[in-house]
Image (cartoon, coloured by chain):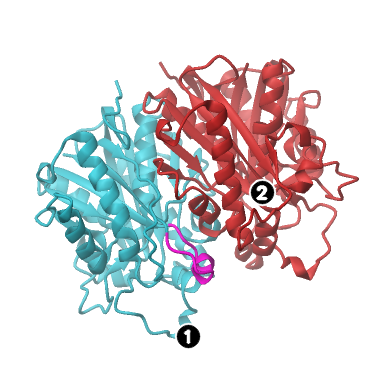
Chain colours: A red, B cyan
Amino acid sequence: MNNKPGRQTAALGEPVYIKAHAAVVGAKEGEGPLGADFDMVVSDDKMGQDSWDLAEGAFQKTAVELVLKKAHLNNDDIDYVLSGDLQNQCVATHYGLRDTRIPFFGLYGACSTMVESMSLGAVLVSAGLAQHTLCLTSSHFCSAEKQYRNPLEYGGQRTPTAQWTVTGSGAAVLSKYGNGPHITHITTGRILDKGVTDISNMGAAMAPAAIDTLEAHFNDTGRKPDYYDLILTGDLGTVGSDILKELIKKDGYDISRQHNDCGKMMYDIEKQDVHAGASGCGCCATVLCGHILREMEKGTYKRVLVAATGALMNPLTVLQGESIPAIAHAVAIEA
Amino acid sequence: MNNKPGRQTAALGEPVYIKAHAAVVGAKEGEGPLGADFDMVVSDDKMGQDSWDLAEGAFQKTAVELVLKKAHLNNDDIDYVLSGDLQNQCVATHYGLRDTRIPFFGLYGACSTMVESMSLGAVLVSAGLAQHTLCLTSSHFCSAEKQYRNPLEYGGQRTPTAQWTVTGSGAAVLSKYGNGPHITHITTGRILDKGVTDISNMGAAMAPAAIDTLEAHFNDTGRKPDYYDLILTGDLGTVGSDILKELIKKDGYDISRQHNDCGKMMYDIEKQDVHAGASGCGCCATVLCGHILREMEKGTYKRVLVAATGALMNPLTVLQGESIPAIAHAVAIEA
């Protein structure tokens, strides 16, 4: 039976297997250090579409095709699909998935969406309401820049703390059956606003939420950081990762040995000129579904805690002088 | 145990009770035919805030306070809160709920959000992962107009098929325990795009999704429309409701006796000059949590099927010539 050892953490009564995972990324991501691990690297970031907005949807559509093929399943075999993205009203998701005809739960968790999706997807499987759920998300550098920052043509300079939005989509099929990596716990984040107002420093805005959720996970489960081979945050980048490690150490948790961050792993930060690293819903989704789960299957990692972080403002609230609320959702995966 | 009689419908193994429900609305909604049923009617639609955007968040915050008081619960008693709204990146929700410190799942289902929230909230309770979940959503006429249509100051004329966005928030606490109205089934919608491109005719865009989900519910459960005293759609308004009733009849389901629509019930459509009726996430949320659940407790209705519909475009995709995808989620409630 399911049980809930603490306020924020639920232990799944039966493990929920990650039956298949796939990632499709753009050219810049393909040129990064993880390039060889992605199932598909496309040279045309527009995916043959008329707009960046629709192109992002095409990345989601492609990720679904890739992951279903790897899972040897059809659309009809999937009980629920759970997705969302950064575009206003999550339109990359809605247009990208409109032909799938799979019962759909739309999510908005900003860059925490991949883990939010896997959390609820795992609950549906664990509760016996689904045999297979499809969990995914996406982001696109060009659709994000024009919506959150400046028109691309403007060529605005980026601050040193800015992160580069990943172009790509990662997807996972969760299943009752399997024998590889499986989700054992979900730790659901709470909205936390520490008063950060710099929209070019998402890492600083999101780090406190990562601390809140990781500490909740340790408290709820009684585990220490050493339990995990890898504690992976979503997209804190270099600045946010340093804040996380320093502040969580003050609370008695030294995660410096096991910690890595998808935002630090995606690009060669120096050579690819991405300042504080990568970001976007697609960052955690593609690093997890492209690289990390492959490494778990190879035996590199046995126990991984993934905490994806999201910044919950919009450009308007920041212009209105509001601070940036953030959240982090975590899942524990064992191989 | 839980079981899944059909592709889109899940029967909850144990009933999930609606322990408490509350609604707070603005002045215009308070002057409508359901005015006396709302827990609070505020005369200041700005709720003392500096912007309409934050005002909508204050409606959510107030709805949470009202419903927790009625449920005799504190924030700490709630295992999960599930919410979302129409603002870009769902900021009404994030700012409105940022002080609650309740584990949070962010949703985007446009005007289907209330039922999406109750569906996943019920799954969490039914799966034994939560004793209490808090399900809510909101909308605000002023934040919606400026974002989706025109600045209020512009005073643009509205087409006859246009609907009026409800200002308000409705919330429900779902619980393992209780003895009143309870959720027995959830029927999860699929994205459906029938090619409608008129952003001033949401009813027409959403009616096919309502048909898709209602027919799935009947097919999956073997029930006929007569099983229900009331089949309530979210916010199709007058135009969409007529389309729904006519087209679903052609498929063999006559729902004309039991059907009503929150968008038709909220305002006195003639006197309050709202053209085709009400809309917005807050429409289904406040009509359900203010009026319908009260009527169920009084015995007026014993079996209600609520199907909330959502239009999944954004203003940009419509300007780009795209059609409007839609979705409908349903829950069956019995008293």
Residue placed most toward the observer, A180 or B299: A180
Most extreme residue toward the right, as rendered? A271
Residue placed most toward the observer, A226 or A233: A233
Which SS class for mark 2? loop
Query: As shown in the figure, which amino acid type bears the numbered disc 2?
Result: Lys
Which SS class for mark 1? helix
Whether residue A333 sits left or right of residue A159 in the image: it is left
Q: Quadrant of the C terminus of chain B?
A: top left
Tell me what residue is drawn at x 66 percent, y 67 percent. Answer: A319
Whether residue A309 sits left or right of residue A186 in the image: it is right
Q: Which mark is residue B235?
A: none
Q: Does A31 sit above or below residue A256?
A: below
The span shown in magenta is B312-324
Residue A107 lies in the magenta-colored region: no
Task: Give the image location of residue A121, x and y in percent.
Answer: 48, 32
Q: Which residue carries the number 2 mark?
A: A194
Q: Which residue carries the number 1 mark?
A: B154
Q: Quadrant of the N terminus of chain B?
A: top left
Task: Give the image location of residue A144, x and y in percent.
Answer: 66, 57
